[in-house]
Amino acid sequence: MTAVQTKSRPAPHYAWVVVAVTFMTLLVTAGAMSTPGLLLVSLQKEFGWSTATISTSLSLRLAVFGLMAPFSAALMLRFGLRRIMTIAVIVTAIGVGATAFVSQSWQLDLLWGLVVGGGTGMTALVLGATVANTWFAQRRGLVIGLMTASSASGQLLFLPLFASINEKFGWRPLVTLVACVLLCLAPVIALLMRNRPADIGLTPYGAPAGTEISRPKPPAENPIIVSFRALKGAVHSKNFWLLCFGFFVCGLSTNGLVGTHLIAACGDHNIPEVAAAGLLALMGAFDLFGTVASGWLSDKYDNRYLLCIYYSLRGLSLLYLPVALGTDLVAVSLFAAFYGLDWFATLPPTIRLTTDRFGTTIGPLVFGWMFVAHQLGASIAAYGAGLTRTLDGTYAPAFALSGVLCIVAGFASLAIDGKKKSDSGKTVLATGTAS
């Protein structure tokens, strides 16, 4: 009898394990960040705080979350992905869990503004960009789409469950449960996450045959200095400012406005809290398709035109939202589905443009600074919309202004130049200048 040899299939590249761990981390931390939209109503009822007072804490959280981004990218370069991700989820768990004991508004500012904002900011969307650039030579757009979808949808998909827990058991058991889930995630990251392919003797996924295993040394300099050095090189480029403006409007029109205030806006039109949370979950479901598809498209088409389309469609949907809220739940559901497709679809093209214009090494650092603009926009919207509601009794002006700015940002994206730049990472890390 002759033995028949069968050709075994190669094992999947470990890069996909890294993607799975990162996807779960972003999903869970984003889910933790979704609770303020529910807490806003609950804290008003229990403590009698105004929308503007609570919005101050939420605005501070979004600002700190964004300000951490450029430094978290540098920290990942210096100390590795696994260590920073583990620390981030533990810090976030402490901040969320301690919220159960607040009794004064300044305590909410401290916990949600600084602790939770800082913890979630250590990962944020910079983590997805860093993983894609470090572990993948091909399919970066698709990976970025997956990472973005997990972060964006995590803010929405858990809301019906959270709203149900909040309604039946109260907001304190809710934040305690979220903190416990975060703590359970920490050992998973410590066990399975790896910093770079070379740590386990691999080259990045899709690297050409014969590519040598690269073992770059982490920068010895202070991560803060490295981050500011990347910014110094980027500010001389008009592309940086155009991308920052678009990203500022992106944050203003998504988690700062809709993610924070839609439940309260629905309440103004007699839509129950659980139903309103379901609308956000519907957005999250459609966002999974929209953002992953956007990542796939960003590998194939001019990302400037994709941004123009995405921002313009988002603007039109926000202009429609006040009309939908004044109609019925079906009309708001149509808004949620259409808007959800575009919830974070702008991120894959933005990250690809940043990587193409500033290089794979420094790209995540530059994107981190652009994310500051994103979260400043979110912070302004979180506070400004709350103030508008307190003073005028309606969110309509905030929705309308956001819609107009989205359309402007879409056409501004067309002014980004079409030239790709070589990777300037070594230059920036060594001399502080970018080509």
Image (cartoon, rainbow, N blue to C red):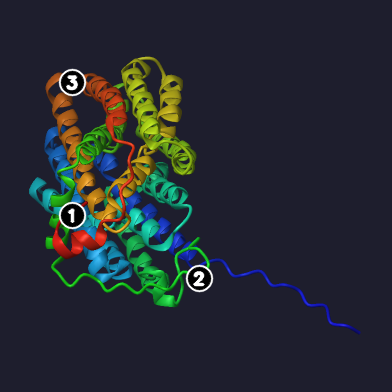
Residue under pointer 2: 210
Residue at (37, 40) in percent of width and height: 349
Tell me where residue 310 sits by quadrant.
Answer: top left
* Mark 2 surroundings within 10 Å by alpha-carbon count, few (fewer than 14), some (14 through 19), many (20 or more): few
Tell me where residue 73 sits by quadrant.
Answer: bottom left
- Element assignment for label 1: helix
Residue furthest to the bottom in view is 1
* Disc 2 versus disc 3: nearer the observer: 2
* Mark 1 surroundings within 10 Å by alpha-carbon count, few (fewer than 14), some (14 through 19), many (20 or more): many
Residue under pointer 3: 393
Q: Left or right: 79 with respect to 273?
A: left
Residue under pointer 1: 230
Mark-to-mark CA distance, 1 and 2:
31 Å
Under mark 3, the amino acid is Gly
Under mark 2, the amino acid is Gly
Vertical side of 26 occupied by 353: above or below = above
Vertical side of 430 occupied by 261: above or below = above
> Looking at this view, is 41 or 129 the one in front?
129
Q: Earlier in the sequence, mark 1 or mark 2?
A: 2
Mark-to-mark CA distance, 1 and 3:
44 Å
Q: Left or right: 278 with respect to 103?
A: right
- Element assignment for label 2: loop
Under mark 1, the amino acid is Ala
Residue furthest to the right in view is 1
